[in-house]
Image: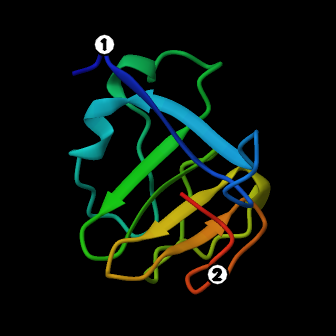
Amino acid sequence: GESVYLFVGAVASKEASTAYVGAFGPSKLLTTKTDSTSEAFKPAKFRSDPSYKVYWYNYPNRSFGFASVSAVKLNAPDHCDETAETRLCWRMNGYGGYRAGSKSDLQDNKTWHK
């Protein structure tokens, strides 16, 4: 529910002690499916909170992730360059992660971890 939160992030290696990029959100976002390839959503609990600047997407068979603005470009992963350093995208079609901040094309990378 909305009272349980999770951290979604990426680290540059298994040995990393801090996340390269990450965000907290209600656990419900894992089961909230989206169908827009251009707009991510802000969880209902935070819609009136201007300090919560995380927009999420969970497009089935494409990708899951977040950005600090609602604009996304989901061709499969998020290719939007606006605020690149605040984005994370995991491909959900059998490939690995696509982006961690401004680092992209990570789907075959064996060092970065979700």
Quadrant where the image shows the N terminus: top left
Tally the numbered discs.
2
Q: Residue at x 44, y 35 (%)?
A: 42
Which residue has dot 2 on it?
A: 109
Res 104 → quadrant: bottom right
Q: In which quarter of the image is the C terminus?
A: bottom right
* Residue type, numbered disc 1: Ser
Q: What element carries label 2?
A: loop
Residue 33 placement, left or right of 98: left
The crowding category of the residue bearing disc 2, from other C-alpha atoms within 10 Å (few below 14, some 14 to 19, many at least 20), is few
Image mark for residue 55: none
Of residue 9 and residue 69, the one placed in the foreground of this image is 9
Quadrant housing residue 61 = bottom left
The residue lying at 76 percent from left, 49 percent from top is: 16
Above or below, 25 relative to 111: above
- The 10 Å Cα crowd at callout 1, few under 14, some 14 to 19, many 20 or more, is few
The residue tagged 1 is: 3
Left or right of 27 in this view: 104: right
- Residue at 44 percent of width and 47 percent of height: 56
> Could you tell which of marks 2 and 1 lies nearer the N-terminus?
1
Residue 81 vertical position relative to residue 58 in the rendered view, above or below: below
In the rendered structure, which amino acid carries the disc numbered 2?
Asn
Residue 52 in percent (x, y) is at 59, 24
Q: Distance between the residues labelled 2 and 1?
A: 34 Å
In the image shown, does 47 or 9 lie closer to the viewer?
Answer: 9
Give the image location of residue 48, x and y in percent: 48, 16
Q: Do the residues labelled 2 and 1 touch (CB within 8 Å)?
A: no
Q: Position of residue 70 (x, y in %)?
A: 54, 49
Q: Looking at the picture, does residue 53 appear above or below residue 87?
A: above
